[in-house]
Amino acid sequence: MVENVIIMGAAGRDFHNFNVYFRGNPRYHVVGFTATQIPNIDGRCYPAVLAGEEYPEGIPIHPDRDLARLIREHRVDLAAFSYSDVPHTEVMHKAAVVTAAGADFIIIGAPYTMLSSTRTVISVCAVRTGCGKSQTSREVLRILQGMGKRAVSVRHPMPYGDLTEQVVQRFAVHTDMDRHRCTIEEREEYEPVIDMGIPVYAGVDYEKILRAAETEADVIVWDGGNNDTPFYKPDIHIVVFDPHRAGHETAYHPGETNMLMADIAVINKVDSADPEKVLQVRRTIERHNPSAGIVLADSAVIPDDPAAIRGKRVLVVEDGPTLTHGEMTFGAGVIAARRFGAAERVDPRPYLEGSLIRTFADYPRIDRLLPAMGYGPDQIRDLEATINRTPCDLVLAATPIDLARLITVRHPVQRIRYTYRDNSRPTLAELLLKRLSA
């Protein structure tokens, strides 16, 4: 008998699970996706050209709130949980909704969805959103460049636009991001790597992406999203931990899975974290995955002009996903404001425009800073308007991109960059070279 399936997702892992696990499998018929976490990704359709001949009209994408009703109406047998950075308790709440509605609930085992490569694959993942995964990926790429290796980065999917135009994407220059109409979130991941002279691949069909990347690389660096597991089978699996959220490494899905699979565990932000929390995370890793090599790292905060921050009333703009589903209450911008003597962090909440009002309602923990939300043109316009309405002396832009390329800001803007630095030995390079030569 054919089983009816719903895939629960957020426009990334869900599509990949469909492509590698359900597409072309005569045992299953996928009646729909449900979408959550990311604005404006429901109400679309996974197109027929990607879904295959069994789905001539494509596969509809529904809001997550309709899950129970869809299970009953479509006589769904199986719901596959396929998104990331969710508390373990929330996963089981979803399981309760599914099973009460009459379907089985599954999480597909990580190895079942990993594609094999003919090249060396190094994956960089994390236990939570906002641990410093991207800066660690860039450090891995720098190490490989120093070894004379041809490296490319393959980024976890962020397919928020026309899926038929995003099957395989390659970014090598800034105009590639303009041509693909990238969101702020996408640009934050692609731009710093492009600036290193390294191409970035992304898209929807990661089998096709892998084969394209293999044509120009000795080593493929999988740059994960949120705290998801790799789409490619890694030869070396690097996992990043955040001592500012000590304890989360065993409390969130699938971050704990990443911890258990790690070859190298990077405890980041040691320079700004409580030493007791760093030790707590280290002991957790040693207890649950004693074979992992452990690296201590700093997330170095680098302002354009530290002296210009002192005494100023600043509006801090931080990375959006870190503050939203990453649940952090501060980032590099707040650290820079404190460290370099800002007189005040201005509260943007009285000046919010449009979609940002809903963002703050959904994430009430955000306080006296502004997430750089930009999942589409409307959000980017709302971000620009909110920044310009907020009275301040200086905007501290602590996102990985140059916001001034995308929006017009009336206030002076200072970029706050943050980068990977080894805190002590063993260094990341030492452990990576040891693993590569093994």
Image (cartoon, helix red, strand yellow):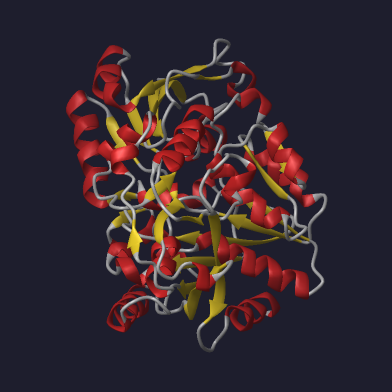
Q: Position of residue 15 (x, y in %)?
A: 52, 33
Q: Position of residue 49 (x, y in %)?
A: 64, 19
94 above or below 281?
above
**Is 73 situated left or right of 174 in this image?**
left
Q: Position of residue 183 (x, y in %)?
A: 56, 37
Q: Nearer the viewer, residue 348 or 144?
A: 348
234 above or below 11?
below
Residue 116 in sight here:
no
> What number of labels is visible?
0
Q: Quadrant of the N terminus?
A: top left
Name which quarter of the figure residue 178 lies in: top right
Q: Nearer the viewer, residue 17 or 10?
A: 10
190 above or below 179?
below
**Residue drawn where x is 31% and y is 79% of the image:** 274
Q: Which residue lies most toward the bottom here?
A: 425
Residue 406 in sight here:
yes
**Residue drawn where x is 44% and y is 61% of the image:** 333
Q: Quadrant of the C terminus?
A: bottom right
Q: Nearer the viewer, residue 417 or 212?
A: 417
Q: Position of residue 349 (x, y in %)?
A: 30, 42
**Residue drawn where x is 28% and y is 40% of the image:** 350
Name which quarter of the figure residue 53 lies in: top right
